[in-house]
Amino acid sequence: MVSKDDKANWSPPKPHLEVGSAPEGVNAKRVQGRRLTGPQQGFGQLWQKTYKVAISQKTPEQVIATWKAEYGRFWPSHSKFYAPVTGIQPGEVGLIKSTSGPVPLSTGVLVLYSDDVSFCYMTPEGHPFAGFITFSSHVEDPVGTMAQVQLLIRANDPAYEAGMMLFGSKAEDRMWEHTLRSLADYLGSSSPVDTKVVRVDQKRIWKNFNNLKYNGALPWARRSKGPATPPR
Amino acid sequence: MPESKIAMTVREPKGDVRIIDIAGELTSFSEPVLAEAYEDADRPGVKTVLLNFSDLDYMNSGGIGLLVTTLIRAQRKSQALGAFGLTDHYRQIFELTRLDEAIGIYDDEQSALKGS
């Protein structure tokens, strides 16, 4: 087998996220200086959600090139993604502003990995989820090229876990189904979006209960200038 | 699904330890191969499963996701999951993704066995 040099595909080490200039109306404080959170740094149950759609007219490379170049275009109107100035490149930070939930949300993601047929985001402290969001394209027989979003996520704290159970999970499904539908429309496919949801781990990680202190949707955290301590 | 370019074999260096030797490319398409290897390694009395990355050619973010689900599988069985043979680059990826906080990382097989 041939060894691939994939160093350029991965983000360099990021002990803390650094945000350059933030667009007007986006609260970069919710991202600046925050640590990344993988699934094991979150609180809630672990879910693997896979959404995919056939875009048989294009190659996987064409799908991903378009997705990266026009990423924000495919999002629903209640959420806005501010892509890094240099585009979706490993190590760059994208900012997010969303009004889909009961409280407006400002957060962001790190571009953890990127190659010709995939890219992956990792979430920071204070994001509703801890984990990875992977966008990819591949060929499946007999359908042809597929575009896929796969989330491997836990709610980051107990408040977000409650929100996920009440409405967040369905809202998440709707958001990614919308995104794939828009991408497919843009690339000339009318195929339906297929959704598969698997609960990978039903246990919650109680030692991460205190992630609440980063939750910008909670009043005590919103008032503070930096990471705050929740009431005891 | 694209064909997975990976091979895995299971060894028994100690009664309660199994090693999965990984050779090739670890991506999300490796899931059935890793699941089968883990099933093979998961025998009664096994307390630790070690992943040997010495012959890993390449790993993408899908491969990292696969390691997370393998970790959950191990935790469900009350087994420890460890890794050795990682290059500096992939060791850095484990640190970046904070997988190193849940999966024990060792320099080589000897130290992995000593630590397990």
Image (cartoon, coloured by chain):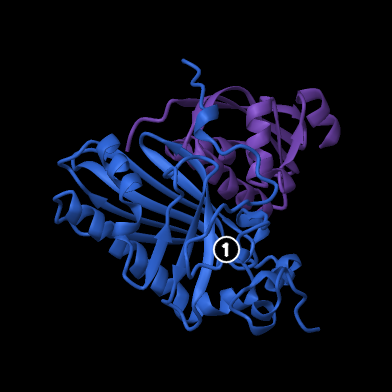
Chain colours: A blue, B purple
Which residue: 59% across, 48% down? B68
Q: Position of residue B87 (x, y in %)?
A: 66, 24
Q: Is residue B43 visible?
A: no
Q: Position of residue B75 (x, y in %)?
A: 68, 53
- Badge 1 marks a residue whose secondary structure is helix
Direction from residue A19 to residue A26 in the image, left or right: left
Which residue: 76% across, 66% down? A207
Q: Is residue A210 above or below residue B99?
A: below
Viewer-closest of A6 and A47: A6
Q: Is residue A82 above or below residue B96?
A: below
Q: Position of residue A25 (x, y in %)?
A: 48, 70
Direction from residue B112 to residue A106 in the image, left or right: left
Crowding near the residue tagged with mark 1, few <14, some 14–19, many ≥20 C-alpha atoms within 10 Å? many
Q: Quadrant of residue A31?
A: bottom right
Which residue: 64% across, 28% down? B89
Residue linked to disc 1: A28
Direction from residue B5 to residue A213 in the image, left or right: right
Q: Is residue A138 above or below residue A82?
A: above
Residue type at mark 1: give it: Ala
Direction from residue A149 to residue B47 in the image, left or right: right
Which residue: 31% across, 63% down? A177
Q: Position of residue B3 (x, y in %)?
A: 36, 30
Viewer-closest of A50 and A65: A65
